[in-house]
Image (spheres, rainbow, N blue to C red):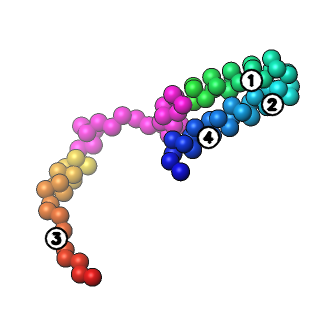
């Protein structure tokens, strides 16, 4: 299954779960309130998940000027010709 479909199904399942729990706790009004809350939570998570993961791993912006040894290595390997191996079957 495509990742987008999986994500949509999981988000729909969360909203449905909130609706069922809201209906059990507060009837029709509780269900509507829980559905609104679940939908708002999904929208927030969808739009901010990339930032949350980067913050969780303490990601920092990569600056080539701060990593001179890596850049020197990369420049030396960038000009090496690719292996021209023949594969026989």
Q: Is residue 69 left or right of residue 51?
A: left
Residue placed under numbered mark 3 in the picture: 84
| Up-down relation of residue 2 to residue 33 (above or below) | below
Q: Nearer the viewer, residue 34 or 50?
A: 34
The one nearer the camera, 89 or 54, is 89
Q: Residue furthest bottom?
A: 89
For the residues carrying marks 3 and 2, which lies nearer the camera in this image? 2
Q: Secondary structure at mark 1?
A: helix
Is disc 3 surrounded by few (<14), some (14 to 19) or many (20+) residues within 10 Å?
A: few
Q: Nearer the viewer, mark 3 or mark 4?
A: 4
> How far apart are the two marked residues, 1 and 2, measured between alpha carbons?
8 Å
Disc 4 target residue: 9
Q: CA distance from mark 3 to mark 1?
A: 61 Å
Query: Are dots 1 and 2 in contact, CB under 8 Å?
Result: yes
Q: Which residue is located at x 68 percent, y 35 percent?
A: 14
Mark-to-mark CA distance, 3 and 4: 46 Å
Q: Quadrant of residue 6?
A: top right
From the image, which quarter does the C terminus lie in? bottom left
Span highlighted in magenta in the image:
46-68
């Amino acid at each position: 299954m495509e990742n987008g479909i999986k994500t949509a199904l999981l988000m729909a399942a969360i909203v449905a779960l909130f609706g069922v729990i809201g209906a059990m706790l507060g009837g029709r009004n509780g269900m509507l309130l829980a559905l609104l809350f679940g939908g708002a939570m999904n929208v927030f998570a969808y739009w901010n998940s990339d930032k949350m993961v980067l913050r969780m791993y303490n990601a920092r912006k990569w600056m080539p000027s701060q990593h001179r040894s890596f850049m020197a290595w990369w420049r030396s390997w960038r000009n090496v010709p690719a292996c021209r191996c023949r594969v026989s079957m």
